[in-house]
Amino acid sequence: MLRVENLTKVFPDGTVALKNVSFDVRDGEFLTVIGLSGSGKSTLLRCINRLIDPTEGRVIWNDVDITAASGKELRHIRRQIGMIFQQFNLVKRSSVMTNVLSGRLGYAHPWLSLLHQFSGQDHKRALAALERVGIGDKADNRADQLSGGQQQRVAIARALMQEPSLMLADEPVASLDPVLAHSILQYLELLNRQDGITVICSLHFLDLVHRYATRVIGLKAGELVFDGIPGELTRERFKEVYGEEAEMVTVGGQAVN
């Protein structure tokens, strides 16, 4: 169980990214986070794994206060939380295998990790992760030789190396075309259903939310304005989250109006 309690984030320039946000996530859920750019989606995900420190509030995971953790305890927590980014965050000039193995750094001996030395078992695990996302034959390619969809699959394989219980995905399909978007989300859905990994994924499009989410929260100007199942997210409720911008958000190729 993940509990977000009264989470607030104010950046040094005075920007209020999150305002007193609270919600729970049950183990095994596929939770999507929707909202306009600047609504606080990315900040929320980064506060959960402490890439960003919140100004106020707490994030509790399995009765452990992530917001109070530091040092070895925080490293242990982060090891169990995979992160997938919109722009993939790969080392483009390194091989696919090297990128995937980097997901194992949290388990490696500190001195060996500096030399990027991994065991034969870790290499086998990395290849299995790549095969699971359908690109085992790309292990020796440079990351920048792959398509966008293939690079995002490398990012998923890298996150799998952490053996995560929770997967955070920050708009993982925003830079992909609709066919590739479904391909990537299907991999996340598979991990959610087969491995029981809890997924929290920010998305923009209502058709993707209805297809993949088991639950939805909506953010508007940093505040939680919707929390429910996809079936409750009608076009009118969608407009409550997106306001006038809902006219520009497509649903299966049709504008919401």
Image (cartoon, helix red, strand yellow):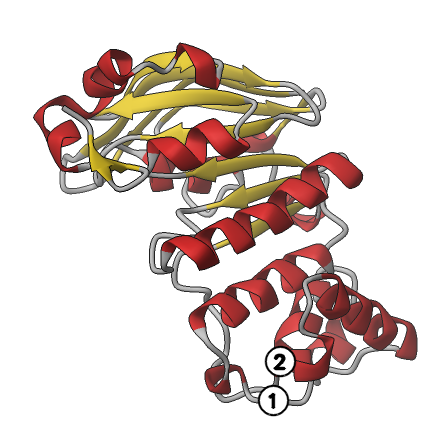
Report which residue position mark 1 lands on: 141
Cα–Cα gap, marks 2 and 1:
6 Å
Residue 125 left/right relative to 178 = right
Q: Residues within 10 Å of mark 2 (few under 14, many from 20)?
A: many
Number of numbered labels in the structure image: 2
Residue 135 percent coordinates (x, y): 67, 73
Residue 20 percent coordinates (x, y): 33, 15
154 or 113: nearer the eye? 154
Sequence-first disc among 2 and 1: 2
Residue 194 left/right relative to 238 = right
Residue 207 percent coordinates (x, y): 39, 33
Callout 2 touching callout 1 (CB < 8 Å): yes
Determine which quarter of the picture holds residue 30. top right
Determine which quarter of the picture holds residue 44. top left
Q: Residues within 10 Å of mark 1 (few under 14, many from 20)?
A: some
Query: Is residue 244 visible in the rendered structure shown here?
Result: yes
57 or 194: nearer the eye? 194
**Amino acid found under the numbered disc labelled 2:** Val
- Please name the residue shown 77% across and 51% down the image: 163
Residue 192 percent coordinates (x, y): 69, 37
Task: For the C terminus, give its image quadrant.
Answer: top left
Query: What secondary structure is marked by label 1?
Result: loop
Query: Is residue 109 visible in the rendered structure shown here?
Result: no
- Please name the residue shown 26% across and 42% down the image: 253
Report which residue position mark 2 lands on: 96
Determine which quarter of the picture holds residue 118. bottom right
Query: What secondary structure is marked by label 2?
Result: helix
244 or 234: nearer the eye? 234
Task: For the N terminus, give its image quadrant.
Answer: top right
Q: Is residue 194 above or below residue 31?
A: below
